[in-house]
Image: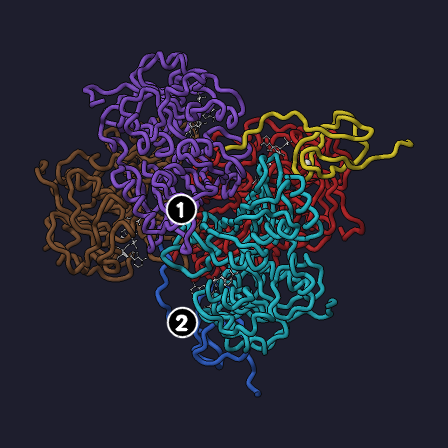
Chain colours: A red, B purple, C cyan, D brown, E yellow, F blue
Amino acid sequence: MTGRAGPVRAAVVGGAGYIGGELVRLLLGHPRVELATVTSRRLAGRRVSTTHPNLRGLTELTFTAPEDLGRHDVLLLATEHGLAMGAMRGLLDLADTVVDLSADFRLRDPAVFAAYYGGPHAAPDLLAEFVTGLPELHRKRLRDADRISVPGCMATAAILALHPLADAGLLGAGEVTVDGRTGSSGSGSAPSAANVHAERSGALRVFAPTAHRHQAEITQAVGVPARMTATGVEAVRGVQVLCRVPLADGVDEAATRAVYRRYYRDEPFVRVVAARRGTYRLPEPKILAGSNFCDVGFAVDPHGGWALLVAALDNLVKGGAGNAVQCLNVRFGWPERLGLEFPGLHPA
Amino acid sequence: MTGRAGPVRAAVVGGAGYIGGELVRLLLGHPRVELATVTSRRLAGRRVSTTHPNLRGLTELTFTAPEDLGRHDVLLLATEHGLAMGAMRGLLDLADTVVDLSADFRLRDPAVFAAYYGGPHAAPDLLAEFVTGLPELHRKRLRDADRISVPGCMATAAILALHPLADAGLLGAGEVTVDGRTGSSGSGSAPSAANVHAERSGALRVFAPTAHRHQAEITQAVGVPARMTATGVEAVRGVQVLCRVPLADGVDEAATRAVYRRYYRDEPFVRVVAARRGTYRLPEPKILAGSNFCDVGFAVDPHGGWALLVAALDNLVKGGAGNAVQCLNVRFGWPERLGLEFPGLHPA
Amino acid sequence: MTGRAGPVRAAVVGGAGYIGGELVRLLLGHPRVELATVTSRRLAGRRVSTTHPNLRGLTELTFTAPEDLGRHDVLLLATEHGLAMGAMRGLLDLADTVVDLSADFRLRDPAVFAAYYGGPHAAPDLLAEFVTGLPELHRKRLRDADRISVPGCMATAAILALHPLADAGLLGAGEVTVDGRTGSSGSGSAPSAANVHAERSGALRVFAPTAHRHQAEITQAVGVPARMTATGVEAVRGVQVLCRVPLADGVDEAATRAVYRRYYRDEPFVRVVAARRGTYRLPEPKILAGSNFCDVGFAVDPHGGWALLVAALDNLVKGGAGNAVQCLNVRFGWPERLGLEFPGLHPA
Amino acid sequence: MTGRAGPVRAAVVGGAGYIGGELVRLLLGHPRVELATVTSRRLAGRRVSTTHPNLRGLTELTFTAPEDLGRHDVLLLATEHGLAMGAMRGLLDLADTVVDLSADFRLRDPAVFAAYYGGPHAAPDLLAEFVTGLPELHRKRLRDADRISVPGCMATAAILALHPLADAGLLGAGEVTVDGRTGSSGSGSAPSAANVHAERSGALRVFAPTAHRHQAEITQAVGVPARMTATGVEAVRGVQVLCRVPLADGVDEAATRAVYRRYYRDEPFVRVVAARRGTYRLPEPKILAGSNFCDVGFAVDPHGGWALLVAALDNLVKGGAGNAVQCLNVRFGWPERLGLEFPGLHPA
Amino acid sequence: MTVQEQTTARCPECAADVPFAEPPRLSELVECGECQVELEVVTVQPVTLAPAPEVEEDWGE
Amino acid sequence: MTVQEQTTARCPECAADVPFAEPPRLSELVECGECQVELEVVTVQPVTLAPAPEVEEDWGE
Ligand SMILES: NC(=O)c1ccc[n+]([C@@H]2O[C@H](COP(=O)([O-])OP(=O)(O)OC[C@H]3O[C@@H](n4cnc5c(N)ncnc54)[C@H](OP(=O)(O)O)[C@@H]3O)[C@@H](O)[C@H]2O)c1
Ligand SMILES: NC(=O)c1ccc[n+]([C@@H]2O[C@H](COP(=O)([O-])OP(=O)(O)OC[C@H]3O[C@@H](n4cnc5c(N)ncnc54)[C@H](OP(=O)(O)O)[C@@H]3O)[C@@H](O)[C@H]2O)c1
Ligand SMILES: NC(=O)c1ccc[n+]([C@@H]2O[C@H](COP(=O)([O-])OP(=O)(O)OC[C@H]3O[C@@H](n4cnc5c(N)ncnc54)[C@H](OP(=O)(O)O)[C@@H]3O)[C@@H](O)[C@H]2O)c1
Ligand SMILES: NC(=O)c1ccc[n+]([C@@H]2O[C@H](COP(=O)([O-])OP(=O)(O)OC[C@H]3O[C@@H](n4cnc5c(N)ncnc54)[C@H](OP(=O)(O)O)[C@@H]3O)[C@@H](O)[C@H]2O)c1
Ligand SMILES: [Zn+2]
Ligand SMILES: [Zn+2]
């Protein structure tokens, strides 16, 4: 689709949470979008900038009760998983374009969904209508997609690390393992005994030792079975994944580097980071906070046979809200970087 | 009182919280105390070491419901403020010696209590029976005290910083201001929107801009009016106070140092820290985590007239549980350092 | 001055440091500036983005040796203090407009400079030519200023907190005290025994107990003597100041609020933050990282007579590089927010 | 050997570093050891407690120049790797018992040493004389060992995680991978561009993507080839390792648990931590700071075939100085917990 | 409607003007943008505000 | 000058193309943009690069 004239009117559903707040930040700064409505059950009537104090002075919006949500051009859903699948039919009546950031429409196979989310899907027939919101893999289909499902934060990082090698046929036979590390915002804003500061601070919490849910998304996207563990680390924002992969015979560092360079040469938000000198040789999330970059790197074992792939991103940006905005840019034919220019900070 | 033969049987009331857990840790390691009971409303029947995982392998104790609490030699109360004053009469029947770590019996004047805690005291007649559990000021009275009220964490630091100068008559006329900084464990273990990790992490939260409650304790102990602000800082444990004081005419650094050295020469748990070289010149809490030290230092303005006093401690140890154990050591005639030998870590 | 057509060619001198890197980030994103040159003694020939890894993919610039620096429209100096004053005459030949971010030209009185910086100024006759780079106080003069000296990070926060009350005549007689708290980037990027991670991490380091240098800048700007202490806190970026001020008779919260609201109503980068509810009631730096906001708030003692003023900013942005860019925007007649739109993050 | 009467006179060589400081802390608190000497090249003549401020008030020792080191009963070497192997012959003349905490005498095979440390060993003939200082594996030999080499911090954790399964024959065929995570104190106290606070803070630095040195120690101890990666995480102290292992046919969680429980039933410093409820289900280092515990846990994939083993410890205690003291306790026939009673803190 | 619409009212806590998007209803709750206090509309002509009863919020440490 | 200018050379470490702003001089040092290795110009016609001798950089923990 080509660009359109007036601003696109958007609503964020579930705007009091962390993904919701990040959507609000990005959409307020987006020159082609008019953020008209932000919903919250708990905080209807309250100012958005009290909950998200970085936005003070930038918006006078107050939260709208979900039942008062009217028609918009685009709905972005930032609700906890399990909600969107039940509400989707009603929501599709309210907008031509719906972008779901929850987990509900990420897996194409309802049986896989049931296995990973502990129950049947509430709208299995809609699953096929959703396009995965990852421009690096699905840019073409996203150009006219009106049901978009944004992948999980660690899944996005792992897919962007693994896909080039898989696609180029450089993976050898054998197991792919994914070790995810995530900051505390990855589990949302609701207080609990596990995320109170004194308990969560300084944690190295192996909360998913054998089969993190995102492994299903990774396998679906990359086509190879992955085993995924995940650890909560000391950070608010930020995700890093380490993928250990077998390499096909004779694949060395130069071949690996060539694949990544070619694959991501024109991507606006993926950088290949695999340096031999300096302090920041492989991707790290801390310099990515607030930015839409996913940094991807690799280290090939000098004796050959396997490599460690490393990817990092901000879970709330490229791992969620920023990626959703990038999808909108693709969908509406806008420049893909629009509203997503912030590069991240150093030092940080 | 002189030493006694058998172990003292102790119970911790409110042992699922942070002060309660620290009492459990210290009493389990105390050679003269038998920790017989730890109560919790919410967790009765559960293992103490599930809540306080540092104690795994050290105790098989489970939490007891408060209503099942029987007779002990000593009760240590670690409940949120407001509870002990109502329950005190009943508790006094259960033990000869009661040490209250909550705020309920710290202020001798019920009117001051009411002004600072927003309501009348439930047992004003008992207030006078309590001795302030601060051996540095009240060691003699503590030797046979059976109702002991341990001061607040920031109050303890401020009192130990201010008292020597006040006592020696070195304070000038004018306002004393106290700036307290505290880690997140200072507000207890109950999750809330304000202390969820992503919100509390990296905070510099001026939560008491004009009159923190501990200023009433400071004024009571030091005899000069104090104005106290308080800020939550990025730390789990640790308190630091900065006291800005006017000095009497002619008081210089040498005179100040002499007072502190004399005052704390024989104190087992107060160290005078005011160095002119090195990285750690004035007291900092990070090297005190787990230790019962309160470090006290000062800097006299080169042009005279005022000084900055600095004190640091671990809010859960010298600012609470450790101080309570030190009081027990005094009360039962044991060596004052018993069970409190851990010096803190460097680096930390 | 009114706007000009072509881009302004700028050079950053001392671009390998933290202020230098932040200038590079902001100028690369500025639509009216062409960043032509970045100098470094140590790293001449090396890529700028190896030192500042957030800028990977955004620039191919390499560092230039200082002796190879040629003519530009604007020079921005980010060298350690003491360098600019000696080099200034030579630098003034290389550009019409020079913005110094170091401390060398902040104090108008050479005697005050000597007292605070431990030696005579190397170019005292140039001091009067510099305009203080704080648009909130000097916007008019900055419109055609070609020698601009950007104030210190904590000084900026304190001045923006104090100036409205002083200007409105609401300060009472008596001492103003300033308590500054700063992250580790405030002392630059050179490794030392004091800022190695294991020592600096979790610090509450009272490194300036009696007279931090920025107090001279505050006194110069606000016209009242200030006593300033400073503490290094656990953070990379971020400054917060607490100013305790006496209030003139009868000044209450409503009067105070009215002054701040009026004073900062049209300021693009100062927000008044003094809420009675919510988690973020007074200014905190963590939500300001990367942003050019200075948040300013206050709490008036309910019994009257004094107030606590609180201000927060990112030391590298509004406390340095961002403020410099804002000055350029004023100087060249561009919209004042240009290139400075990033609002900061929540959670952070 | 059985216990001896008088105190053992000990010297710490390299006492200004982090491992050295931890040895000083532990030996000062050890009832059977007299810490007579602490050496430092750089700081000879300076007070030990200026460098290690947690020890203020606990020792009046000053650093001794290495060349002035005289005879002692025990020498503990805490120098950077590469030093001990050259100096060992001279040091063996100065004491009957030498405990080396550096990497120099950990590997029995000089060829392996050369491959991992980039050069030939300076005293290959001495390698066989050293007993690995890991009581859990070598308690019997340590009882009369006079040359003890303490393993690396991450190696200790990985060996304690892997050895029970390997020993019991429960490992299947296939690759063992070890993912180590370490705090900043693991790389010592010397300042560098990589460990300055603003760079190292919040890091997730994959500094050893393919073959960390400790993998040679792990393979030597466990008998299976291991591939080890390592990441620097935000922490000062603390190490965690995740080992992904293939399981022999039919090995399930119950069998795994049985092996660990049996293996570590009587170990004073290894706890099996693999809970299904609570916040701390698998080992985490933050509650172990200062303690000599190594917590070991596991999660068996519900579909069988592999398990994730997790171990955590304080790199300076069980990962170094504490382990060395435990070895001394074994060697001199003292109770194995002596001087190592501190259990760690919660919250932390 | 002929009633003249009042678009702001004064916050009783901090004296700031609190704007209304539409004519307020009695008992409606609004939040003051200046001090974030929750306010209740207690009269509508003219519009006056009073602090809404609050669940005691614990912010202490 | 008639010498044809070569504007890039191959990094011997990672095979990336390393660009030059101007004709390189012998022994000049350049940094590979891909892998950040420091390279020395060892011949100029054609331009070839070799890893520059490095002070051993300690990056370990
Ligand atoms: N966090 C991430 O990194 C991330 C990344 C990608 C995708 N996602 C997905 O995005 C969705 C939202 O995730 P999130 O992290 O933003 O979750 P969240 O912070 O928990 O927010 C979700 C919703 O929960 C409610 N909520 C927020 N704070 C609450 C509190 N303190 N108490 C009670 N309810 C509260 C709010 O709705 P009401 O105000 O209506 O009650 C909010 O809109 C999820 O489906 C998640 O899977 C998250
Ligand atoms: N924290 C400090 O630094 C400090 C220092 C000195 C004195 N004090 C004083 O010591 C007393 C206890 O303080 P604290 O910091 O230990 O408070 P806390 O952690 O909140 O514990 C107090 C009690 O609250 C209950 N509790 C704990 N966790 C909870 C949760 N997640 N949800 C609901 N209830 C929970 C528990 O009782 P049940 O299991 O019975 O419900 C616990 O025993 C207070 O009076 C305080 O003023 C504290
Ligand atoms: N940091 C702040 O928050 C802040 C705020 C406002 C103003 N300022 C002022 O800005 C100026 C620069 O401050 P800064 O914080 O950016 O200082 P900095 O990081 O130390 O940088 C200053 C210069 O020091 C050199 N340098 C950087 N890293 C080094 C290293 N690892 N070893 C040796 N030299 C190194 C570099 O010059 P070469 O490459 O040429 O050697 C660099 O350009 C100062 O005058 C300061 O007062 C700072
Ligand atoms: N850190 C760990 O977690 C750990 C664990 C197990 C084993 N180890 C091993 O223990 C040994 C010592 O490690 P470490 O971590 O204690 O190293 P470290 O802190 O660097 O100390 C080693 C020695 O380096 C010198 N040194 C200390 N600070 C310095 C500074 N700021 N500048 C220059 N030199 C300085 C000191 O010797 P002088 O005063 O004589 O110059 C010090 O004794 C190493 O062989 C290491 O492999 C370490
Ligand atoms: Zn108001
Ligand atoms: Zn290269």
Residue at numbered disc 2: F52
The label number, if any, that marks residue B248 in the structure image: 1
Please state the chain letter of the residue tagged with numbered disc 1 in the rendered image.
B
Labels 2 & 1 near each other (Cβ < 8 A)? no
Q: Nearer the viewer, residue C335 or B170?
A: B170
Give the x, y percent position of residue B160: 36, 38
Would you say residue A13 is visible in this rendering?
no
Give the x, y percent position of residue B225: 46, 36
Please state the chain letter of the residue tagged with numbered disc 2 in the rendered image.
F
**Quadrant where ligand 2 appears:** top left
Q: Residue furthest front?
A: B249
For label 2, the SS is: loop
Dot 1 amino acid type: Ala
- The residue at 46%/33% (across/down) is B214
The correct choice, above or below, for B253 with respect to A93 in the image is below
Give the x, y percent position of residue C229: 46, 51
* Beta carbon of the mark 2 residue lies under 8 A of ligand 6: no
Dot 2 amino acid type: Ala
Would you say residue B49 is visible in this rendering?
yes
The label number, if any, that marks residue D113 in the structure image: none
Q: Residue furthest right?
A: E2
